[in-house]
Image (cartoon, rainbow, N blue to C red):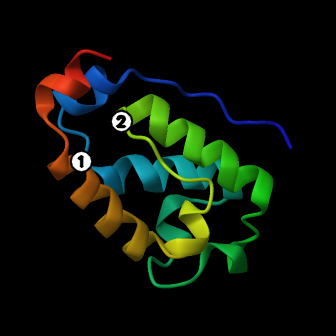
Amino acid sequence: MTVPSSRHTATTATAVGVPPHAWLSARLSLYLRRAPETIDPTVPLAEYGMDSVAALSLCGDLEDEFGLEVEPTLLWDHPTVESLVRHLSAALAATEPSARDQR
């Protein structure tokens, strides 16, 4: 699988106020090769064809974009967009802004 490329720095994403849902929807649309509006946030991503390679790549993207450390099992623990956004929002809220900005 070819990894989609559209990298931003963590400070760029947070500085312009990109919420995790908007970033995640755009990123998933690249991996799943479908328009963001066609991804139901309550449907497991595996039903759209998200495989383990794409899931691990997305974990790396999340680490790069938001400066978070995520487990490789993230998408199995949070299989829907809705669940994943809740988890990411909580993780981002728990991090200190100064720690994210230094990355």
For the point 57% across and 59% down, the residue is 35
- The residue under label 1 is 92
For the point 13% across and 23% down, the residue is 98
Left/right of residue 18 with respect to residue 62 in the rendered view: left
Q: Nearer the viewer, residue 66 or 95?
A: 95
Residue found at the far bottom of this picture: 42
- Label 1: how many residues lie within 10 Å, few (<14), some (14-19) or many (20+)? some
Q: Amino acid at mark 2?
A: Phe
Left/right of residue 75 with respect to residue 25 in the rendered view: right
Left/right of residue 15 with respect to residue 81 in the rendered view: left
For the point 28% across and 22% down, the residue is 12
Q: Answer whether labels 2 and 1 touch (C-beta < 8 Å).
A: yes
Q: Position of residue 99 (x, y in %)?
A: 20, 25
Q: Secondary structure at mark 2?
A: helix
The answer to whether 33 is drawn above or below residue 41 in the figure is above
- The residue under label 2 is 66
Q: Amino acid at mark 1?
A: Leu
Q: Quadrant of the N terminus?
A: top right
Left/right of residue 11 with respect to residue 98 in the rendered view: right
The answer to whether 66 is drawn above or below residue 98 in the figure is below
Q: Secondary structure at mark 1?
A: helix
Q: CA distance from mark 2 to mark 1?
A: 8 Å
Q: Position of residue 70 (x, y in %)?
A: 48, 48
Q: Earlier in the sequence, mark 2 or mark 1?
A: 2
Q: Quadrant of residue 86?
A: bottom left
For the point 26% across and 22% down, the residue is 11
Q: Quadrant of the C terminus?
A: top left
